[in-house]
Image: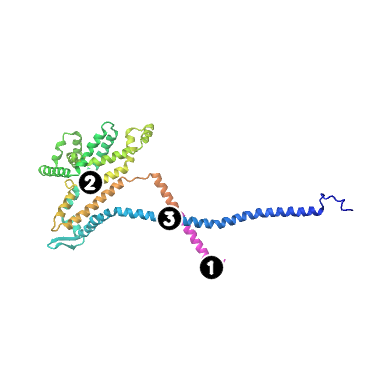
């Protein structure tokens, strides 16, 4: 055949084979690239991740250093701001506190060269309770004073604050009137009033017997009932009524604190209780008083401390002042009396904390007990499993697997 008879555009078998090989190679290359591309991406990510982590850790460290330096500057400024108070506390409070402890175990006497201190152990404490006729009566007088006075001040403060919170007309004037005694009490006027009241009470007590204390209130029917039931209780109530004007002087700050606590209670709680058909008495005992428990704790502790600071009504404070002024041999006894008085005051405050402590319901207590039992059982089972594993390991070492 001639070459001219062949059609140039007609494909031959060789060309078809070449095209198939080329197409197959392109497909394999495309598949290979599809496989290689995710591998490359994962390699890049794995290489980039530690770099990113290093960068983030370095930036976090720099931020922490900046925060530490900022926090250190803030702490330094705070300590510098508090430095005068800390210095005053160390000099005027901590040092006398430590010296009072030392003096309570010493016999102190005044000499021409100053004070002479001799360590005698607990003799001052023994003499306070056994060999002294002034300390125990003063201590009992303090306890007889602090318990009813604190109760009356707290209850009266709550009642007055509750009424003042309900009043809408003249509220500011009445609050100012009830807070005025606090302003006067801070000066010498209150001290003179309490001193005059104490002298009057001492004169009346020396002139009359204990029975005549209830004569001024013997016409009151309730007082007659109380006197027929218990004469000491009637005498105590009569004494409280005699000094009721003095007691009212201590209700200024507690009234303000109670009003603040009452105003913080959400009114929607009262509305919900009224919708549930609760009366005023139930709202008082179920909502108002429980929500004022924290404020009542603060007020009670404040009242105990405040009442103990006036020597006209606190015989212990007066006795400590007298012994402190006795420079010949009274400093050791004064320090001893002060420490015993402080411990008793702290015990009273501890009892107050227990009274105002939130009590958990019985179902919650039972659930907590059950949880404790389950935890104990889990611990016991874990110990038992550990002991079994140890025993198995020992047997495997001895006898082989």
Disc 1 to disc 2: CB gap under 8 Å: no
Label located before the other in sequence (2 or 3): 3
> Residue 397 has which mark?
1
Residue extent of the magenta highlight: 378-401
Q: Residue at x 73, y 53 (%)?
A: 24
Q: Nearer the viewer, mark 3 or mark 1?
A: 3
> Residue 64 has which mark?
3
> Residue 306 has which mark?
2
Relative placement, left or right, of 282 versus 62 is left
For the residues labelled 2 and 3, the Cα–Cα distance comes to 48 Å
For the residues labelled 3 and 1, the Cα–Cα distance comes to 51 Å
Rendered view: 41 above or below 288: below
Rendered view: 399 above or below 171: below
Label located before the other in sequence (1 or 2): 2
Q: Position of residue 287 (x, y in %)?
A: 34, 38
Q: Nearer the viewer, mark 1 or mark 2?
A: 2
Prevailing SS of the magenta stretch: helix
Q: Is residue 142 found inside the magenta-colored segment of the image? A: no
Q: Residue at x 79, y 53 (%)?
A: 15
Q: Residue at x 23, y 39 (%)?
A: 179
Element type at marker 1? Answer: helix
């Amino acid at each position: 055949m001639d070459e001219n008879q062949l059609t140039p555009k007609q494909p031959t078998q060789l060309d078809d084979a070449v095209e198939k090989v080329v197409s197959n190679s392109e497909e394999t290359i495309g598949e290979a690239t599809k496989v290689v591309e995710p591998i490359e991406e994962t390699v890049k990510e794995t290489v980039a991740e530690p770099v990113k982590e290093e960068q983030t850790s370095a930036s976090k460290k720099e931020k922490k250093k900046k925060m530490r330096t900022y926090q250190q500057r803030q702490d330094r400024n705070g300590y510098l701001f508090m430095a005068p108070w800390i210095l005053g506390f160390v000099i005027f409070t901590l040092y006398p506190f430590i010296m009072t402890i030392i003096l309570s175990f010493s016999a102190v006497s005044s000499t021409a060269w100053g004070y002479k201190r001799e360590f005698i152990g607990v003799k001052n404490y023994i003499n306070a309770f056994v060999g002294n006729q002034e300390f125990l009566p003063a201590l009992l007088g303090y306890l007889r004073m602090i318990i009813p006075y604190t109760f009356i001040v707290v209850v009266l403060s709550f009642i007055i604050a509750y009424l003042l919170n309900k009043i809408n007309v003249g509220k500011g004037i009445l609050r100012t009137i009830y807070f005025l005694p606090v302003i006067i009490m801070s000066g010498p006027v209150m001290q003179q009033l309490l001193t005059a009241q104490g002298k009057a009470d001492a004169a009346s007590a020396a002139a009359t017997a204990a029975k005549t204390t209830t004569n001024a209130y013997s016409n009151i029917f309730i007082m007659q009932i109380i006197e027929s039931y218990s004469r000491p209780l009637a005498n105590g109530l009569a004494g409280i009524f005699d000094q009721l004007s003095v007691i009212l002087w201590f209700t200024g700050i507690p009234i303000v604190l109670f009003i603040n606590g009452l105003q913080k209670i959400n009114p929607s709680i009262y509305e919900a209780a009224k919708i549930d058909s609760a009366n005023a008495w139930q709202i008082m005992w179920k909502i108002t008083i429980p929500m004022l428990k924290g404020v009542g704790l603060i007020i009670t502790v404040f009242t105990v401390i405040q009442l103990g600071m006036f020597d006209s009504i606190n015989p212990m404070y007066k006795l400590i002042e007298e012994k402190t002024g006795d420079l010949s041999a009274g400093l050791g006894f004064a320090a001893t009396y002060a420490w015993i008085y402080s411990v008793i005051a702290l015990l009273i405050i501890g009892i107050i904390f227990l009274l105002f402590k939130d009590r958990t319901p019985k179902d919650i207590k039972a659930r907590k007990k059950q949880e404790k039992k389950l935890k104990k059982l889990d611990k016991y089972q874990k110990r038992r499993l550990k002991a079994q594993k140890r025993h198995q390991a020992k047997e495997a070492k001895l006898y082989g697997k």
